[in-house]
């Protein structure tokens, strides 16, 4: 590597000196530095065009960012923890080019190929910047005829989508991939991958977390029994993957209006996306009258049951959920265990709405309490307000935590304040 001595500094001084002179044809003579030669040519026309750009703003491209030295210190510490965890589990490091053949990427990404950055024709090859690290890994395995590999890779990827900086969505960002490629006995590698995620998130001390999992066979089986045509399975699944960014109503609209799915089929899918839970959910889905008709779904459920057994042995079953999505933002459900309490429920829910609290109730005069409880658990509503004859006569009300099933009795006039307090602490 050449020594960066005085000659290199004089080369830059010569270049700057020429740039600051009045516009004219400029040719900076070559300045030798050991075996290297620095040459720069700038015409007066180029200088003129630069001077005319009075509105030129120095900034990073949209959807990108610089990391300051202070931020880099934090980033490097985080990556050190992540990579050390990968190595602790026996993974090998891998690096691949930032760009790949466009044809290979578009074949894999299907609906998302419009989000890729294409490069100009370079030597007869059509190229695109990598969208993630998975396809390059698959290409590496195929090229080298490898059937098994436990690997990790940390690197930048690029996606040409509308950035949302507040949500942390950039066009250029770093991914940390860990994959176990090959054929193994069911769910053993899957359980280890989840263990790795728990180790990393716990080591970074980010607070409480919940990892969501699913099985493609369960999803495909669910689509089949709901009536999704086989030709639309992948594209409808692509819409489902957007549920972490979009509401169910928006996803349904895309399925029906954009992808041509029948409305009644989309509604049947909607019945399933609100389910959540761990091993108990798997058992519940085994008994589902529609889903149990699909052998593919039953195979997936059997493996998920096995997965949760392994997760229990790893000590992380409480960190894993089969949750698909919360389709509403409801915070409180107003319920009653008795008949003829519709008017009281209407008064309570109006009071909650006036306080800006997101609340709902069942549109029935006399709903069964079990139905109301099941609805809250199924839709993951955190709090339930319960009013009955005893509570009304005593001027109190019950507030139930749906997750823990704990109930407390509070004064009726303190209801809004208590709910707001709990929501602010959650």
Image: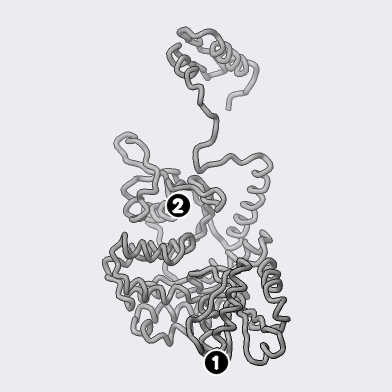
Element assignment for label 2: loop
From the viewer's perspective, tell me whether residue 79 is left or right of residue 216.
Answer: right
Relative image position of residue 28 (x, y in whole percent): 50, 11
Which residue is denoted by mark 1 in the rendering?
Answer: 339
140 lies above or below 379? above
Quarter residue 3 falls in: top right
Q: Quadrant of residue 203?
A: bottom right
Question: Which residue is at a point 54% across and 73% down the rendered structure image?
Answer: 321
Query: In screen coordinates, is 131 left or right of 351?
Result: left
Q: Residue at x 67, y 48 (%)?
A: 74
Compared with residue 25, is residue 81 higher up or lower down, i.e. above or below? below
In this figure, which residue is indicated by the disc labeled 2? 132
Is residue 41 something that shows in the picture?
no
Residue 239 is situated, as x and y percent measured from the top left of the image, at 38, 62
Q: Residues within 10 Å of mark 2 (few under 14, many from 20)?
A: many
106 vs 334, nearest the viewer:
334
114 on left or right of 55: left
């Amino acid at each position: 590597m050449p020594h960066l001595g005085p000659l290199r500094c004089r080369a830059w001084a010569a270049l700057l000196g020429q740039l600051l002179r009045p516009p004219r044809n400029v040719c900076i003579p070559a300045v030798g530095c050991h075996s290297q030669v620095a040459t720069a040519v700038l015409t007066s026309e180029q200088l003129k065009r630069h001077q005319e750009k009075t509105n030129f703003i120095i900034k990073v491209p949209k959807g990108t960012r610089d990391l300051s030295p202070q931020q880099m210190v934090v980033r490097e510490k985080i990556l050190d923890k992540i990579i050390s965890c990968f190595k602790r589990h026996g993974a090998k490091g891998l690096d691949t080019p930032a760009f790949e053949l466009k044809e290979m990427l578009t074949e894999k990404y299907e609906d998302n190929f419009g989000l890729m950055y294409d490069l100009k024709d370079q030597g007869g090859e059509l190229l695109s910047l990598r969208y993630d690290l998975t396809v390059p890994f698959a290409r590496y395995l195929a090229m080298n005829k490898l059937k098994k590999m436990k690997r990790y890779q940390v690197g930048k990827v690029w996606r040409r989508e509308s950035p949302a900086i507040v949500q942390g969505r950039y066009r250029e960002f770093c991914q940390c991939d860990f994959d176990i490629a090959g054929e193994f006995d069911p769910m053993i590698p899957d359980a280890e991958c989840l263990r790795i995620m728990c180790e990393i998130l716990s080591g970074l001390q980010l607070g409480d977390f919940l990892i969501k999992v699913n099985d493609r066979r369960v999803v495909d089986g669910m689509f089949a029994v709901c009536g999704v045509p086989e030709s639309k399975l992948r594209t409808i699944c692509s819409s489902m993957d957007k549920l972490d960014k979009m509401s169910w109503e928006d996803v349904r609209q895309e399925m029906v209006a954009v992808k041509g799915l029948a409305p009644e089929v989309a509604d049947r899918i909607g019945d399933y996306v609100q389910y959540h839970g761990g091993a108990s959910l798997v058992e519940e889905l085994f008994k589902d009258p529609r889903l149990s008709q699909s052998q593919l779904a039953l195979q997936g459920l059997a493996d998920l049951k096995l997965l949760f057994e392994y997760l229990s042995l790893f000590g992380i079953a409480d960190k894993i959920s089969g949750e698909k999505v919360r389709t509403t933002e409801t915070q409180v459900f107003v319920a009653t265990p008795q008949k003829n309490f519709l008017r009281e429920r209407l008064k309570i829910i109006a009071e909650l709405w006036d306080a800006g609290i997101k609340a709902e109730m069942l549109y029935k005069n006399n709903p069964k309490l079990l139905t109301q409880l099941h609805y809250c658990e199924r839709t993951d509503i955190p709090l339930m307000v319960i009013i009955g004859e005893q509570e009304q006569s005593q001027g109190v009300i019950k507030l139930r935590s749906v997750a823990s099933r704990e109930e407390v009795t509070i004064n009726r006039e303190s209801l809004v304040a208590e709910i707001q307090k709990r929501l602010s602490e959650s």
